Amino acid sequence: MTGVRARLSRQHLIRTLGLWGATALVGLFVLGPILWMVDSSLQGENELLSRPSHILPVNPSFDNYNYIFTGEIPRSFAVRGAIRSRISQEARQIPQALENSVIVALGVTLINLLLGSLAAYSFARIRFRGKGLTFNFLLGSRLLPAMAIAIPYYTIINGLGQLDTYTALIVVYLTFTLPFTVWFLREYFLLLPKETEDAALIDGCNRFQTLVHIVLPLAAPAMVAAGAFAFMASYNEFLFALLLTQTINSQTLPVIIASVAVNPDASFALISVSVVLAMVPPLLFAIGIRRYLTRGLVGAIGHA
């Protein structure tokens, strides 16, 4: 009996160690690049280029961050009294590009939730002629490859005189994110008990009041999940941001980071700082909505 218990105990220990080992490997795979960027952003350029390289900064400094926000040249770029050319002047545009990205992404998110909830509720609860055809057309439009409609969108935006504006990016991003929002919220609305809405209608509420006071509070997790998708899709989009913007007045973070990275004489330290700063808004956004986001996604998947 003692031998059986010992064998079971060893098997349990092996499974536990295997689970922790697999978790550590996955965690390293996911967090490794992020930690590498953070580590590199705190090192001077000379330290990054030294051989052998350092896993941890020998003299950690926020000089690289200070340069991006203030323009003060980091001490590590001074070599024998001269300023090295690897200074990546484009990196100075990161703060403005970060602001542009957040404004555009929040604008797309808010409009998605406003229009998407109205359209989704209509498709879920209201009968009207052409409902199925309209809904299928809406979903089908999401299947079009972005490259196939890039030139037509550019021509339309240029004809309207909206090139290099927030409006152009928000309108174009809505065409990609709104179909998903409508579909996702419609599926969630269909899962909600219809009896509660019927009771509100009997008590004198109209459809809009029922949506605002009954349905949306119940569907808050789904609203957050849909908003998160719209935010991230808009924040990370590159093709149309490159095509429709021309100056830093509206250029978003992916465009500026690309211009920093493709510079053949770019500073590795400043590239790392740019990437780290780009991760901050999505990270803060995710932390703020993580509870609702998890409930919304799990609820939708659990009832699928």
Image (cartoon, grey):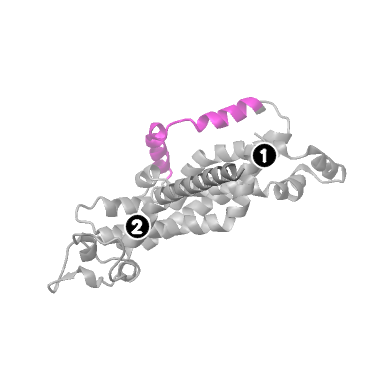
Q: Is residue 11 left or right of residue 51?
A: right
What are the residue bounds of the magenta stretch? Answer: 132-160
Which disc is residue 53 wearing?
none
Q: Which residue is mark 2?
A: 37
Q: Quadrant of the N terminus?
A: top right
Q: CA distance from mark 2 to mark 1?
A: 38 Å
Q: Position of residue 257 (x, y in %)?
A: 33, 53
Which one is nearer the viewer's eye here, 141 or 264?
264
| Neighbours of disc 2 within 10 Å: few (<14), some (14-19), many (20+) | some
Q: In this rendering, would 13 be left or right of 90?
A: right
Q: Which residue is mark 1?
A: 188
- Magenta residue check for 288: no
**Residue 113, position as x, y percentages in the image:** 60, 47
Q: Is residue 47 left or right of residue 233?
A: left
- Which circle, 2 or 1, is nearer the viewer? 2
Label 1 crowd (10 A; few <14 / some 14-19 / many >=20): many
The front one of 235 and 107 is 235
Q: Are marks 2 and 1 in contact (CB under 8 Å)?
A: no
Residue ID at (23%, 53%): 263
Residue 276 horizontal/vertical position (percent): 38, 59
User: Does residue 185 appear to the left or right of 203 in the view shown?
Assistant: left
Q: Is residue 171 visible?
A: no
Q: Does the magenta portion include 134? A: yes
